[in-house]
Amino acid sequence: MAVPAWLTRNVFHPLWALKDGSLVRRYMADAERAQFLPAAELEELQWTRLKALLAHAEASVPYYRDLFRERGLSASDICSWTDFEALPLLTKGILQKEKERLKAERLPDPSDECQINRTGGSTGEPLEFLSTRRRGELREATTIRHNRWTGWDLGEPMAVIWGAARDLGGIATLKARLRFALLEKHLTLNTVSMDAARMRNFAEQLKRHRPKTWLAYANSSVLFIRFLREQQIEGISPEAVITSAEMLSEQNRRLIEETLGCPVYDRYGCREVSVIASECGHRADHAMHLAADVLKVEIAASPPGELGAEQGKIIITDLMNFGTPFIRYQIEDISSFAQGGCSCGRTLPLLAPVTGRTSDFLVTADGRVVAGTALTILLLAELPGIARGQLLQYERGKVTFRMVPAGDPSVETTREILAACRGALGADTKVEVEIVEDIPVTPSGKFPFAVSKVDPFEVLQ
Ligand SMILES: [Zn+2]
């Protein structure tokens, strides 16, 4: 029998946090309060947090220590947002090159600890960085806050259409199984490996367990919904779908909403800093509230005529990660600030819909569909020796992995790529590795990690 949501929310979740020495419950209360703070108080909170981060970066992070020294500056000289905005940007290239010098030598809170984190990146560039345990707990609290905007509450099961094995969490250990049974209870369609049988099985589970909220890769949820329509499977009616990780087009939003009869809440985030902004359902233009209590977001100025008015690359400072400080971190995605307030009453500032990450599906020789977005973790984050990568497919069962090597290309790297591709795509899928000097991002910020000319519906019948 499933554990009731109220019991998870009020008993198991607080007890589990206590057992782990986690501050997530305190962070949850802080996050709920922060979303309604008057603008001046929110800015003051950001400023206080920023000053602490800058002081820590100067004292304990070699890259920033040198950066301040070279400029004849001290963190205490930064007295205004204008001063702050004069600091240089942190690009993905710098993060790749300086990853060791960007790691903190010590943390200000002795009860905190660093954890290594990796991402394939939304632009095909693998990154490694440290985040702290406290930042992880804070991420959980922020995600819970943003999920609650959709009508979901802690303890309620979700349907999860997601790909990264690490995000899904293993359930191999007893502790993990217990945590899953008491706290998470999600139903999962793993987008690393989808075929007609798995989709049909997932649909059956949805009908049986009726989770009211879905959390999904935008494109994978669309693929699943098209499958439901073509197979004429009915009787699945969640109350909300949260889409994330990929761009959601207006057309796809309408398809999800019309098929399921419920609203879509789009979300923007990345592994480096977690949830950045989410829809609350009150803005007709689909603007998203920023997690501005934990992040400072700027929009870079763009050359005239290249993008729409007020649009530019998104720049993020994670005010709360003391492991690898992300200070003025430039993401290749494009957006602008949305004007006006929101009738939901939340004062968190608003970001317009984001242009950027996009990825196709790959079709394997053995008839599975694999979400390109999911493969960024398996192929980029986990493998050394790659500066940027991209998968191309022109016919079923055959894939080219195009890559810019980090340093001299090695036979070993090629061998590891081939092994990882075979693991994900099956032994019968032919894989070629092509070494190139550059794979540029388009001026509009788009970088498809996987480009395929094969219709995934070929095999989903
Ligand atoms: Zn709102």
Image: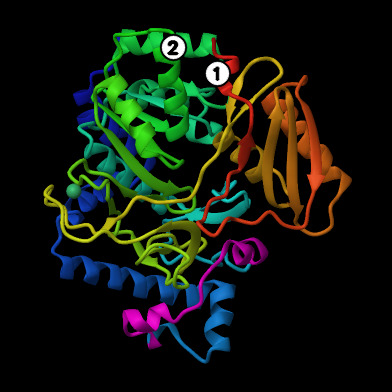
Residue toward you, 131 or 176: 131
Q: In this view, does 264 lie above or below 113?
A: above
Look at mark 2 in the image and give the residue it sits on: 230
28 vs 69, left or right, is left
Marks 1 and 2, how far apart at CA: 10 Å
Look at mark 1 in the image and give the residue it sits on: 457
Residue farthest right in this picture: 411
Say what secondary structure mark 1 lies in: helix
Q: Is residue 339 above or below residue 370?
A: below
Q: Specify few, some or many for label 2: CA neighbours under 10 Å numbering under 14, 14-19, or 20 or more.
A: few
Identified by mark 1, the residue type is: Phe
Residue toward you, 24 or 102: 102
- Which quarter of the figure has residue 231? top left
User: Mark 1 near ligand 1 (CB under 8 Å)?
Assistant: no
Highlighted magenta segment, given as a residue range: 77-100
Residue 182 screen position, x and y as percent: 33, 23
On-image quarter of the C terminus: top right
The reply to whether residue 41 is in sight is yes
Residue drawn at 43 percent across, 69 percent down: 300
Residue 97 screen position, x and y as percent: 67, 65
